[in-house]
Amino acid sequence: MNRNSLIAEIKRKRTLLCVGLDTDINRIPSHLKASPDAVFEFNKQIIDATYDWCVAYKINTAFYESQGAKGWESLEKTVNYIPGTHFKIADAKRGDIGNTSDQYAKAFFETIPFDAVTVAPYMGSDSIKPFLNYPNKWAIVLGLTSNKGSEDFQQQHIGNHFLYEEVIRKTSQWGTPENLMFVVGATKAVELSSIRKIIPSHFLLIPGVGAQGGSLSEVCKYGLTEEGGLLINASRAVIYAGHDANFAKEAAKVAKQYQSEMQQYL
Amino acid sequence: MNRNSLIAEIKRKRTLLCVGLDTDINRIPSHLKASPDAVFEFNKQIIDATYDWCVAYKINTAFYESQGAKGWESLEKTVNYIPGTHFKIADAKRGDIGNTSDQYAKAFFETIPFDAVTVAPYMGSDSIKPFLNYPNKWAIVLGLTSNKGSEDFQQQHIGNHFLYEEVIRKTSQWGTPENLMFVVGATKAVELSSIRKIIPSHFLLIPGVGAQGGSLSEVCKYGLTEEGGLLINASRAVIYAGHDANFAKEAAKVAKQYQSEMQQYL
């Protein structure tokens, strides 16, 4: 999916919501457990219930890999089920030397038709550039993450700025706002304004806006652009909103709440 | 596999060699292509031919993921085929927030019986610690990689030392030499002595000792410890030594050459 199509979807539906399919086999409602592919069945019903309220789905590969080859089958079926109107993100945090990143790009852009893959920057340019060679495909590079461990390295100083700022500044020169996005943790809304000085127009993928809420208005205040410029993810808050036969309805209700709040800012 | 068993195998076989199974379906000899699982058939013959000359196998997950769910089946079969005497590394460069790294640890330590997984440090402590909770399993953290892109961030200064030194120093406090190793690019043999000052006894996984050779003696000079302390990887130089029906014999020949050179230093 190209940038213009993504922006058009955001404006049409008035939402920035990305639904995260971190589908844990142990948290699936019990009535689905007998299904031959319970993970896919769960995802299918979540997608059917939420696609009106979101523009993107993000698949956290770890939850599928933990099920081995069978998990990868559920993953492939899920991606193929997501409507073509929606932006499909492999949240995989990949990155390796050039010939290996080539293989990861092939895995997520050719073998499985994702639009984007999250990429870890530690190994530098040749680990990221292979993901930028596909038209209408995207690398989403880790900038500042929302977890406690972001203090360990990302928030250390390189010269007179933070490592995450150096990562965003340098990486943004390897691609364009048409093929690069950045992960910026929503718990760091204040830092968003300084990041917007470095990359005024790139899309940001914002994780960590959970059921706890509260930060959505700040994220929009400091991160929103004319074109939207944000994909705001909610995973557990949406997909585990309910725990029984009504789980998909409960997920839809929460997704709709997010959309309602987001349209105020758009 | 625990540290003592690994050291015992190194001393018994007098080798530090790790054979990297970066098996590219497009580089498999043509006579194997008709096999229902050509990747596994290739790996099986490589393992049969080389296990006397190495102590470890490293599976580069990207080359399997690029084949989708079928690739993961080849990967699982390969890991299960490797003898219990050998240390099994998932070269996967994973790392994410805690609940997601938990799932990656499950994928590589429970669902598939690897001994170790390579981990990217950018997201900090909670992205690495879940891999340290398994007895006799290991996290191998990226320190200094051998690629050109290592200059972009790893070799930037934080205070008066390099980022990769800070990563090694800080991360080494989260585990022990019994459950933590570090990736150190072989093309940086000079830096090995400064790294050994930070971590005198941890095992290092050294990639990038290729057919080009030459650096093995330097790596041993600066990196070797009483107990070995090095796993030296060769991938393409071994597995693609031959291109036809004799490929496994050619691989054995190259693996044996590495072992012969290594035993001089041990």
Image (cartoon, coloured by chain):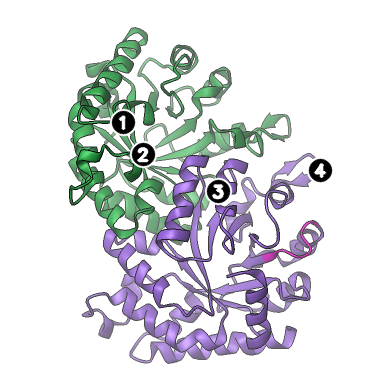
Chain colours: A green, B purple
Q: Are marks 3 and 4 in contact (CB under 8 Å)?
A: no
Q: What residue type is labelled 4?
A: Asn
Mark 3 vs 4, N-terminal side: 3
Which quarter of the figure has residue A252?
Answer: top left
Q: Residue furthest top?
A: A264
Mark 2 vs 1, N-terminal side: 2
**Residue B115 seen by the camera:** yes
Q: Which amino acid does label 1 sit on?
A: Ile
Residue at numbered disc 2: A22
Q: Do the residues labelled 2 and 1 touch (CB within 8 Å)?
A: yes
Question: Which region of the structure is painted magenta?
Answer: B198-203
What's the residue at 64%, 90% (across, down)? B260
Q: What residue type is labelled 3?
A: Pro
The residues tagged by marks 2 and 4 sit, at their Cα atoms, a distance apart of: 40 Å
Q: Do discs 3 and 4 share a chain?
A: yes
Tell me the subunit letter for badge 3. B
- On residue B130, the disc is 3
Q: Nearer the viewer, residue B121 or B210?
A: B121
What's the residue at 69%, 63% (across, down)? B188
Relative to residue A138, is residue B190 depicted above or below?
Answer: below
Q: Nearer the viewer, mark 2 or mark 4?
A: 2
Residue at numbered disc 4: B160
Instruction: Give the dominant element type of the magenta stretch: helix, strand or loop.
Output: loop
The residues tagged by marks 2 and 3 sit, at their Cα atoms, a distance apart of: 17 Å
Q: What element carries label 2?
A: loop
Tell me the subunit letter for badge 4. B
Q: Where is residue A229 in the image (x, y as percent from the top left)?
A: 39, 22
Q: Is residue B202 magenta?
A: yes
Q: Is mark 3 on a helix, strand or loop?
A: helix
Badge 4 local density, few (<14 within 10 Å), some, or many (20+)? few
